Structure formats: C-alpha cells, structure tokens
Image: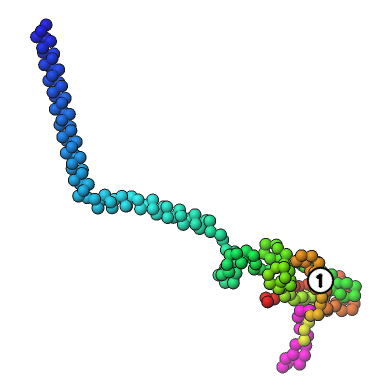
Amino acid sequence: MKHRTLMIVLKARSFLSRRQKEREKCGTIARSTSYDLSQRSHGNTWWRGGLMRLLALPWQVAALVGLVTVSLASAPQRPYSRQEKAYYADAATVQFVRPGLTITINSASVGPDGTITTIYTLTDPSGLPLDAAGVTTPGAISLSYIAAVIPNNQEDYTAYTTRAATGTVIASTQQPGADSGGTTTSLASGQYQYTFHTKAPSGFDPTATHTIGIMDHET
C-alpha cells in the first residue's frame, strides 16, 4: 500500500513538473514573440504610421465629401443667373427688392363712345403688390399701353394707337406705337386703371377682336 501511494505521489510530481516546464516554455516563447514584435514596432514605425494613415484616408475623404454635401444642400439657391444684375446683389437686398415685374391685365373694355380702358395689377415675382410710383415699394415703374383690333374676316391687326414717322421714301406716315396722354388711376394696392387718350374710331365694330397690351420700361 505504501509503495502504491509513493508511486502515485511521484507520478503527480512528475506531471506537475512537466506542466511547469511547459508553462515556462510558453512564457519564453511569448516573451520572445513580444520582444520581436516590439523590435519590429520600433524598427518599422514609419510603416505602421503609413498604414494607419492609409487606412484613415478613406474615412477622411468620406467625411470631407459629407461636409461638402451638407454645405451644398444647406446653401440657399439663388434664383437669378450670372447674366442678371440681381445675382451680384446682397442677399438681404434681393430679399427686400426681389427684382422682377409681373403685369396682369384683369379686364379691358371699349365704351360705346370708343373710350378704351383697362384694369391691371403690378406685382413682384412672389406676388407682392407694387407701387408704380416707387413710394411704398422700391423703384418707380414706367409703362406703355397699346390697343389694336383684328377686323372680322381678317387676320392682321389694325393699330388704334399710332405714332407719326418720317423717312426718305415716305415723307410722313402713321406707325403702330404706344398711347400717350392717357390717365392712370390707382384702385387698390398694386392695382390700376388706365384710360387711353386714343379712342376707337366712330362706327367701330364691337364684335371684332380687340387687344390691349402693356409694356414695362426700365427706369
């Protein structure tokens, strides 16, 4: 029984000794590997730094692209092209002035006596009513008015509003032109009535196609 116990103890000591040697061997290898890696790390710092910079580059590019994309998306879009003066104006000025003019003819009529009248509105591109005199809104507005008729069974216009013209071939003639001497009446904010000085001729055909035109002139 004693011999058997002694053998078990010796075997246990032998097993523990082998385990200890294996651990020491593994530790030596681990230390050697760590040393080698450490040496390589010190000897190849430039390589590691270059690799890290290379790996970081795509993220930097992605971040830059994202920043540019956000900046472009958040930047306000200018409604004017480089060929327009408003493109070079300060944003606050453009917001206040909003260059541009919309003329809308609301109605037109020719009275029995030939009097021609039209009602129209003046607004900016966003629909703000404009003051033609330039008092309550920036800039005075200068307009010209024309009137013409297409007689029944014909295709060409005959102008009611004309102007005298002279030349070398024809001494004097009447050409289509804008009305002059008419009266403008303000009806509401941005809305006006213009009464032509020119009248439709006596005996005009009220069933014919009559046309009114309004043109803007820069001032």
The reply, left or right, for residue 27 in relation to residue 73 is left
Local crowd size for mark 1, using a 10 Å CA cut-off: few (<14), some (14–19), many (≥20):
few
Total marks placed: 1
137 magenta-colored: no
Quarter-of-image position of residue 190: bottom right
The reply, left or right, for residue 40 in relation to residue 122 is left
Q: Position of residue 185 (x, y in %)?
A: 81, 71
Foreground pick, 195 / 86: 86
Q: Is residue 40 above or below residue 199?
A: above
Work out whether residue 63 can be spotted: yes
Prevailing secondary structure class for the magenta stretch in the rendered image: loop
Q: Amino acid at mark 1?
A: Thr
The residue shown at (90%, 73%) is 112
Q: Position of residue 179 (x, y in %)?
A: 78, 79
The residue shown at (21%, 43%) is 37
Residue holding disc 1:
185
Q: Which residues are magenta?
A: 165-179
Quarter-of-image position of residue 90: bottom right
